[in-house]
Image: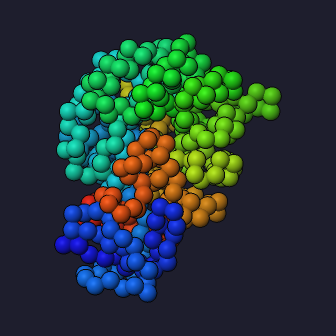
Amino acid sequence: MSYYIHAAKFFLKNVTENGGYLEITDDGKFGDYYPASQKPEGEIKDLGDQWIAPGLVDTHIHGLLGHDVMDNNWDDIQEMSEGLLSCGVTSWLPTTLTGSFDQLNAVCKTIGDHKGEEDGAKIQGIYFEGPYFTEEHKGAQNPKYFKDPSVTEFDEWQKSAKGLLQKIAIAPERKGAVAFTKHVTQSGKVVSLGHSSATFEEAKACIEAGASVFTHTFNGMSGLNHREPGMVGAAMFTQVVDDELICDGHHVRPEVAASLIREKTPEHVALITDCMRAGLMPDGDYVLGEFPVVVKDGMAKLRDGAHSLAGSILKLNDAIKNVVDWNGNTPEEAVLMASYVPAKSCKVADKCGSILPGRDADFIVLKPDMSLAATYLNGQSRYEA
């Protein structure tokens, strides 16, 4: 049966409304919003001083609850999708690491064959983080799988994924990167740039060929120098591209995160988690890809001598709280950067990321301090804090 939500604030797609009523139809879709002066007839769910925002969209997440997308186990992916509801996430892109062609192809087949069976956060596509990267900025990626981009390989993966391979990250300096970018983006999919030592010019060449995202900006890329702008300079200077950003306070200092958001505007920053299998798990020893990782003090680090950050254990609901607590952004901007912008950056904004009539009623309830109170999927309460 349809009902109406009454709350203190509604983050609609283009405006934020105070008070009023949001219709949830009997088939689990968003209906119309009514101002406070137009109280509708019917069942009203009063959420008091809480706020209603679109469900968050995590477009870069490797693992959760001890599982990793690269384990290639559908039951694990289903558990991740359920667990994401406790992070305010209602849509996501399972994200791979670098691996062999066959490993990645197997993941494509598994997700392609089962898409739609997940019972929690909805899979909106697959994100390949690699394997076309550069060793200098490998991070926690395994360089033994690095190679030049291959259109043939991409098309094979896409066939196995039944069209679900939505986004792939590459290093712009790899041989054939521009031609590969043209091929992928002209097929309607997304090329992101990351794990790269590219010059500003090399990055710009891929952007003009169609690349439209930077992978976890600042992390795993050539830095900004006043004479050599590098990848960071390209991420900051180019106008229409979207920049992924990990706002856990460890990957990027809050002041630097705020500077990027101010420069690019919130409409072009996509908050991501880059979460690995230790998300929602206790501190201890884990594995990311083929590398031992130690999780302690809110950070995941490679056990080897370099102690590089190895993904994160960030929850996306904490990221939106962080950017507000850091005094750099309004609640509206924080929500935008974790819902509409990531969806837009992966070309899935027609399915998720906004409260619009006729869309699946996937939304979250926030307390005024930006902490998560509840997550709804198709108009049904699925998680309560």
Taking depth in this image into account, of 201 and 305 the one nearest to the observer is 201
* Residue that protrudes farthest toward the right in the picture: 227
Give the total number of marks visible in the rendering: 0
Which quadrant of the figure has residue 363?
A: bottom left
Residue 15 percent across, percent down from the top left: 52, 67
Is 368 or 293 nearer to us in this picture? 368
- Residue 74 seen in the figure: yes
Residue at 56% x, 19% y is: 178
Viewer-proximal residue, 285 or 215? 215
Q: Is residue 301 left or right of residue 159?
A: right
Q: Residue at x 38, y 52 (%)?
A: 352
Q: Quadrant of residue 123?
A: top left
In the figure, 295 relative to 157: above or below? below
In the visual, does 143 lie left or right of 257? left
Q: Residue at x 25, y 82 (%)?
A: 42
Vertical position of residue 242 compared to residue 193: above or below: below
Q: Quadrant of the C terminus?
A: bottom left
The quadrant in which the N terminus is found is: bottom left
- Left or right side of 308 for 168: left
For image coordinates 26% across by 68% down, the residue present is: 25
- Residue 58 seen from this side: no
**In screen coordinates, is 302 left or right of 380?**
right
Estimate the x, y position of residue 217 in percent, counting from the top left: 59, 38
Image location (x, y in percent) of residue 104: 33, 23
Q: Position of residue 277 (x, y in %)?
A: 36, 40
Here the colouring is: rainbow
